[in-house]
Image (cartoon, grey):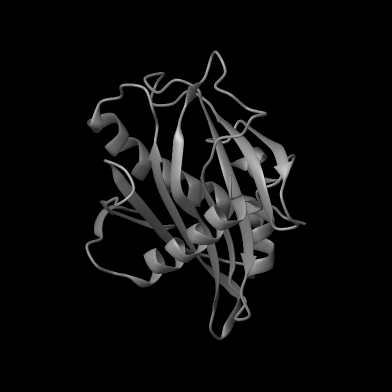
Amino acid sequence: MDYEGKASEVADFLLSYMSDDTGWKVCKKSNDVIVSWRPSSKFPGNVYKGEGIVSDCPERVWECLKPIPNGLRVKWDNNVKNFELLEQITEDISVCRTVTPSAAMGIIAPRDFVDVILVKRYEDGIITSNATNVSHPGCPPQSGYVRGFNHPCGCICVPVSGEPNKTHVFSFFQTDLGGFLPHSVVDSFFPSSMTEFYRNLTKAVKSLV
């Protein structure tokens, strides 16, 4: 499988999602984030966009978002129970398995996702994580978990001009949770989950020493 090619395509998709304002509808607002959605072109569901300002520089915010085993994200993100490295493709590209806990009062069973992930930095200071589903011989579907499928998704840390201690954080989720979940459950889960994501990210960044 062309892991590098797939990962590079995701980076292009995420930048296009960030710059294209067409068709987004706001579905949830809080002090930390605005969550919007529009129909996905990748699967019969929605792509969700979160955007908010986090009070610290991009490098420190990135420390909390970095997709690595035993990283900080497993500690603060309630939707990430475990994160495993399956294969390191290049210095910046890896194939990983993410395990999520049950959610929505048990309606959503534990799931796992296998993704190729690209960490990409741009000359203007933007730092991104870019992920999409792949198959990997070292991680077939496992009992006890519903195999879900992430379509182009990730996080983008953008420096705020003139304010070095602030970061504009964009997040994109377009996930086929698998199983036979009612659309109403999925449509309510992601906006609430993303609001919690930003609230917990802000707390995690503040707690950095």
Q: Residue at x 60, y 30 (%)?
A: 81
What is the quadrant of the N terminus in the image? top right
Q: How many marks?
A: 0
Q: Residue at x 45, y 51 (%)?
A: 152
The x, y position of residue 156, in whole percent, is 53, 63
What is the quadrant of the C terminus in the image? bottom right
Residue farthest toward the top in the current orientation of the protein: 143
Left or right of residue 73: residue 28: left
- Above or below: residue 111 compared with residue 116: above
- Above or below: residue 118 compared with residue 147: below
- Between residues 8 and 207, which one lies in front from this camera angle? 8
The x, y position of residue 74, in whole percent, is 65, 39
The x, y position of residue 37, in whole percent, is 29, 53
- Between residues 44 and 53, which one lies in front from this camera angle? 44
Q: Quadrant of residue 159?
A: bottom right
Q: Residue at x 39, y 68 (%)?
A: 16
Residue farthest toward the front in the current orientation of the protein: 1
Left or right of residue 50: residue 207: right
